[in-house]
Amino acid sequence: MYAYILRRIAWSIPFLFAASFLAFTIIQSPPGDYVESYAAKLEADGRQVDEARLRSLRDRFGLDEPFLAQYWKWISGIAKGDFGLSFQWQQPVSELIGDRMILSVILATSTLLFTWAIALPIGIYSAVKQYSWGDYFFSIIGFIGLATPNFLVALILMYVGVVHFGTNVTGLFSAEYVNASWSWDKFVDLVKHLIIPVVIIGTSATASLIRIMRANLLDELYKPYVTTARAKGLSEFKTIMKYPVRIALNPFASTIAWVFPQIISGSTVVAVVLSLPTVDPLMLDALLTQDMYLAGAFILLLSVMSIIGMIVSDIVLAMIDPRIRYR
Amino acid sequence: MSNTVDHIDPRLPKDIAEASQWQLMWRKFKKHKLALISLYFVGFLYVIAAFAEFFQPFDPEVTSRRDVFHPPQAIKFLDRTEDGTRFRPHVLGTTLSRDPETLATSYEINADEKIYISILGKTKPYKLAGFIPMSRRIIAPTKQGERFYLFGGDRLGRDMLSRTIAGTRISMSIGLVGVAMSLFLGTLIGGMAGYLGGWIDSVSTRAIELILSMPTIPIWLGLSATIPADIDPLMRYFAITVILSLIGWTELARVVRGRFLALRTEDFVTAARLDGARPRRVVFRHIMPSLMSHIIASVSLAIPAMILAETSLSFLGLGLLPPSISWGVLLKEAQNIRSIAQAPWLFTPGVFVLFAVLALNFLGDGLRDAADPYAQDLG
């Protein structure tokens, strides 16, 4: 098992490199370089452009060196915790990211847990009671959930909240807790605010997971070993949970691998609509103003988060399915 | 070929035994009622997209200061006057009033003023699809210069119905163009990986795995942020489709690769190869035809994903930008709570997204079931 985990982590190192390379390419793509835009920005603000400072910045990021050398400087800086400077905010990127990254991780993980907690029982129910009213009900909800862009769901909930209930569903904290230090009350407040974004982001992933679980379980449900278990007098609940569900779980677990990137991706749009204090609104802002070091750092971190999510789901899969860890 | 017929179950009706693969598919597809309805609906949307100008009552760009956030009006078909009741579609006029304190505008229905609508009415001349000169639209105000708002007006008093129809053209076509590009990349890479195997297969499989493990929207956003903002709208449209298909090809490549791997060892492929057919002939004459149905099904499932992606990008302001009109661009107007609280009809393009994507999904499901020769019931 440990050997498998180690192998899996080693396997993801080239992935991490590829992701960072992609992020750096995006940073580099806009015309001009970072210091040029920085100087232009200073001039636009009517401030003195300090030549010596520009020179030191050029040296620091190696802007006159070839692409690969620049990439190396960037990535080794990141290894030391230096993500470069945000020229819009005039601050090191790492200082801007901190808290927001934590909230993003919290949001993504709670969405994943929610997705599982909802999809699993409903998938089992839909398969066991195939073509029942409940099955149809969840199928319809599922199809609509898949077809609606989740920012639309967010907008509609916002509309309903404001117009019919007079409450604001945006943000992750109530006004009195935004700048408060962490306490139990602040945590409770966060959990309350998390519910709506989690439900919105989770909808489409939940819908597809329900379909997958249902299909997998239907494949297993009518196999002879299930009949045998039933014939031996096992209770219906035990029969289903103990045998076909366990087998149906394998392909299900392997789907988390892509559900996690999907959740991170979906949360970007929802976080912008609901103005959540996660990394996403800041990333969008950075991209719109071409604040590329900040944007690149976010893209890199979100990709790393997806890759870690994939590793975790592969390990979970290996725990459920012994065939994988001994391959 | 004559003895192949003998192998077919003699109890089957004769016309099934002789039907081509496409006929069998169509026959099975027709049984899937939801998919059939979806096919008609999708066809309807593409007709609207193709002849968008004809279906728009007004030019989608024309603004009207007096009709800011004009609420939707209902068409009344029967006109009751002193002369009796006649069939004459019209909407009731509205008068604008402004609250002197809050400056909030509100529209009140004015039953005396009627705006008549003629079917195939004459309007200012326009060019259908950019080159066919026309002057009639499917519905138009009888008196030129009058305006009506079946789907309401936006913050500049532009007609939402006309704008939604204009958006249909771009949103529905971006799905097609994007999928065509993904399909090209997907079949090329997936086909090579599946047919040639070896290191090409491992490299492309790893690449696909990498792309699938990335959060797509942040990367799409990052890539579209690098498109210069002052680029021509048409170029931007193509740049966006390229960006969407750079990630979108992976699913198709996976499907194609899987099918190629399965078909490569089939007897008929081996036979073709032993007959001395060159790889190109083996691929295009023998393997591709049996892949077609699968590819069509995957394509119809990839189009809705493209539409949703474009909508999300444009919604965030990094996809298409005005003056291009797509459903996503229109929904961007509904982004802040003030506008949607005042004008909930700005959601209409969202309803279109929802139904288009639903219909395309059902259509894809139906096609996939119909394309699978091993699915349960026969013909």
Image (tube, rainbow, N blue to C red):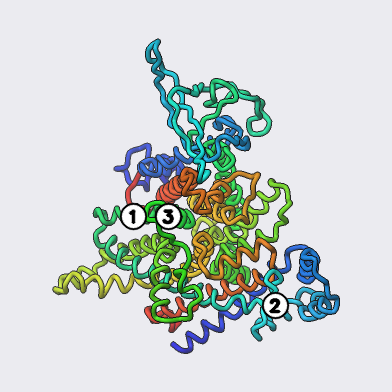
Label 2 vs label 1, nearer the camera: 2
**Quadrant where the C terminus of chain B is found in the figure:** top left
Chain for disc number 2: A
Where A63 falls versus B39 (above or below)? below
Chain hosting mark 1: A
- Classify B42 as above or below A129: above
Residue named by callout 1: A139
Check disc 1 and give the amino acid type.
Answer: Ser
The image position of residue B341, as x and y in percent, is 46, 49
Q: Amino acid at mark 3?
A: Val
1 or 3: mark nearer the eye: 3
Which labelled disc corresponds to residue A84?
2
Locate residue B227, reporting x and y percent.
Answer: 70, 57
Give the Cα separation between the discs numbered 2 and 3: 40 Å
The residue positioned 40% from the left and 56% from the top of the image is: A166
Name the disc covering residue A162, or none.
3
